[in-house]
Image: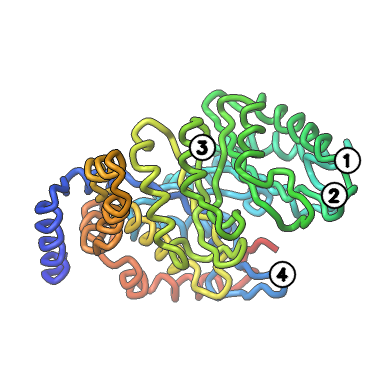
């Protein structure tokens, strides 16, 4: 590290040691942190009104993987990239897997698309038409096979299924249809694969959503089997929802499978994680820290970078996650437990605030450098010329996107 950054780290380390914090232990946990980035986060995206294309966006899945590799190179903790089918459909998935491995990555979660086909206007796996449900199920089975080919162990599912008007369909029958379709896909998965079910309270359906909250997702997982777990998307909650409470309950049930990290102000805004409510992100990590040692939890980013630069946005999201994780690792658990047991309400709260108020940027920079990343990833990226180079190389053709 440069002398200025090095001195900042030394001051922080001395301060943490004085507080009884084992700096080596914190650094070890930070070095093992892993966050998966999504292929679709590197392509063109937008709102219901307009998609704003950007120069240099990937034109195919291979170029998406290349951009993901750049994020991993600079941050050091993003060794996998999630894919979305059919957005990332290729003729040879072995070739895609090999290309990722050549760049130091692996293919992560496989995400089926069950919301953009004309047939899915009234739902996919919950559709009243058996032929449409069969089509949706075949796509799920296709994605299980793709996961086998790329070496993925995660089938990540989000459904737009729901209704717009009272009386449109039977809630219970739709639930049974979903279970029937998902059970077939679940049985087709190899023993090493997990199915993650994501929930969302509304949109695109506005009367009811078939997997509307964590309870609906949890009970469906319990019906399917032990390898079905709940995925929490931070943007998929109503205003005022206590997400860290949900996290604790799912951990206690042994059914928290993963996260889609992003942030929101009003609804599913898909803003950069940590950009609007960083304290909430910190509190979520506080719940996760101890459970990580005995529970597998997949951490993935799911964002739409509509007006901001794609790679810089992904890097900033990752560094926000590093810093929130570091702060959660600094919580004095013994002091917190003692305050709780003695009924010291504000003492317990101050214990969290002490950790949250710590400037952990020098610590995270040191850890990134130790694992081969960059002290300042965004500055390093801007100076690398990567954006200018790919803008020139990708000038011909059409940028990939989700529309």
Location of residue 141 by image quarter: top right
Tag 1, which secondary structure? loop
Label 2, label 4: how far apart the Cα atoms are:
19 Å
Q: Please state, as top left, top right, bottom left or bottom right, where the C terminus lies in the image.
A: bottom right
* Residue of label 3: 250
Report the disc number at residue 122.
2
Percent coordinates x, y for residue 315 in the rendering: 40, 63
154 up-or-down from 16: above or below: above
* Neighbours of disc 1 within 10 Å: few (<14), some (14-19), many (20+): some
69 up-or-down from 56: above or below: above
Mark 3 vs 2, N-terminal side:
2
Location of residue 337 by image quarter: top left
382 up-or-down from 162: above or below: below
Q: Specify whether 57 is left or right of 210.
A: left
Q: Are marks 1 and 3 in contact (CB under 8 Å)?
A: no
- The residue shown at (48%, 45%) is 245
- The residue shown at (76%, 47%) is 161
Note whether residue 288 is visible: yes
* Residue of label 4: 48
Q: Are marks 4 and 1 in contact (CB under 8 Å)?
A: no
- The residue shown at (34%, 56%) is 322
* Neighbours of disc 4 within 10 Å: few (<14), some (14-19), many (20+): few
Label 3, label 2: how far apart the Cα atoms are:
30 Å
* Residue of label 1: 128
Q: Nearer the viewer, residue 358 or 378?
A: 358
Tag 4, which secondary structure? loop
Q: Are marks 2 and 1 in contact (CB under 8 Å)?
A: yes
Percent coordinates x, y for residue 43 in the rendering: 58, 64
Percent coordinates x, y for residue 313 in the rendering: 46, 67
* Neighbours of disc 3 within 10 Å: few (<14), some (14-19), many (20+): many
Tag 2, which secondary structure? helix
24 up-or-down from 153: above or below: below
């Amino acid at each position: 590290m440069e002398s200025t950054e090095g001195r900042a780290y030394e001051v922080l380390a001395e301060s943490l040691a004085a507080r009884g914090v084992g700096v080596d232990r914190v650094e070890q946990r930070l070095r093992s942190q892993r966050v998966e980035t999504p292929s679709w986060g590197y392509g063109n995206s937008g709102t219901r009104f307009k998609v704003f294309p950007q120069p240099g966006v990937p034109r195919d899945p291979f170029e998406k993987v290349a951009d993901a590799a750049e994020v991993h190179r600079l941050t050091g903790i993003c060794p996998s990239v999630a894919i979305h089918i059919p957005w990332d459909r290729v003729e040879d998935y072995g070739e895609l897997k090999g290309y990722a491995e050549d760049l130091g990555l692996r293919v992560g979660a496989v995400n089926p698309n069950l919301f953009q086909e004309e047939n899915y206007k009234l739902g996919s796996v919950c559709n009243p038409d058996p032929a449409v449900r069969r089509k949706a199920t075949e796509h799920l089975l296709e994605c299980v096979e793709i996961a086998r080919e790329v070496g993925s162990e995660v089938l990540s599912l989000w459904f737009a299924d729901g209704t717009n008007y009272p009386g449109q369909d039977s809630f219970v029958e739709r639930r049974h249809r979903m279970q029937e379709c998902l059970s077939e896909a679940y049985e087709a998965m190899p023993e090493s694969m997990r199915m993650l079910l994501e929930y969302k309270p509304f949109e695109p359906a506005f009367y009811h959503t078939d997997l509307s909250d964590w309870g609906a997702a949890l009970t469906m997982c319990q019906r399917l089997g032990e390898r079905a777990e709940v995925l929490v998307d931070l943007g998929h909650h109503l205003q005022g929802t206590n997400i860290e409470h949900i996290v604790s309950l799912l951990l206690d049930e042994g059914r928290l499978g993963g996260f889609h990290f992003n942030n929101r102000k009003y609804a599913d805004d898909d803003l950069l994680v940590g950009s609007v409510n960083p304290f909430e992100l910190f509190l979520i990590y506080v719940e996760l820290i101890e459970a990580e040692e005995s529970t597998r939890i997949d951490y993935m980013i799911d964002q739409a970078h509509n007006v901001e630069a794609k790679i810089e946005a992904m890097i900033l999201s990752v560094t926000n996650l590093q810093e929130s994780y570091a702060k959660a690792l600094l919580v004095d658990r013994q002091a917190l437990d003692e305050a709780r047991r003695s009924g010291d309400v504000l003492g317990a709260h101050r214990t969290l605030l002490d950790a949250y108020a710590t400037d952990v940027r020098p610590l995270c920079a040191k850890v990134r450098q130790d694992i081969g990343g960059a002290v300042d990833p965004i500055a390093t990226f801007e100076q690398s010329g990567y954006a200018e180079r790919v803008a020139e190389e990708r000038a011909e053709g059409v940028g990939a996107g989700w529309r």
